[in-house]
Image: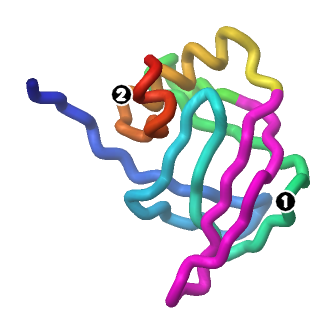
Amino acid sequence: MTSMIQEREVVVQFNAGDPHRQPEGFRCCPLGAQFFSDVELTPYNTVSFRLDDPASGPGAVIECQGVVVNCVPVADSAEYKIFVYFVDLNAEHQARLSALAKTSGLICPYCENFS
């Protein structure tokens, strides 16, 4: 079986800070996100996400809140690997995020096994 995944550049930006291009390990699904940043985030803090969703139309976004569950330094790097659990995705946004994660190849291994 062959699957075609359209490669997309993934960028994380905090507030008005500089965009941070994500390496291959970036993951995003209805459960949450795993991403990399040069900004350390404190566990248990709430963060807002705004994800572009081009498959749903021009300018379409998915907005949600998440809780930082872990933030660990990346060895030999100035970056942190951050894990966020989404806490308020409604059913429509869950479905759209699931579709976006599958088509872009960003889905986490847990969701990949159960979807």
Observer-nearest residue: 67 or 6?
67
Q: Quarter holding the C terminus?
A: top left
On screen, residue 40 above or below 98: below
Count of numbered tags: 2
Bin the neighbour count of mark 1 within 10 Å (Cα to Cα): few under 14, some 14-19, many 20 and up: some
SS at circle 1: loop
Q: Quadrant of residue 42?
A: bottom right
Q: How is the image coloured?
A: rainbow
Pinpoint residue 3: horizontal percent, then vertical percent.
17, 29
**For this view, does 113 lie left or right of residue 74?**
left
Point out which mark residue 28 bears.
none
Q: Which residue is mark 1?
A: 43
Pinpoint residue 106: horizontal percent, then vertical percent.
43, 40
Amino acid carrying mark 1 in the image:
Pro
Name which residue lies at 57% across and 66% down: 20
Pinpoint residue 88: horizontal percent, then vertical percent.
82, 25
Q: From which residue to which does the magenta span run?
A: 63-87
**For this view, does 41 lie left or right of residue 6?**
right
**For this view, does 32 lie left or right of residue 69?**
left
| Chief secondary structure of the magenta portion | strand
Name which residue lies at 73% across and 73% down: 39
Name which residue lies at 47% across and 52% down: 10
On screen, residue 3 above or below 23: above
Amino acid carrying mark 2 in the image:
Thr
Q: Is residue 68 rendered magenta in the image?
A: yes
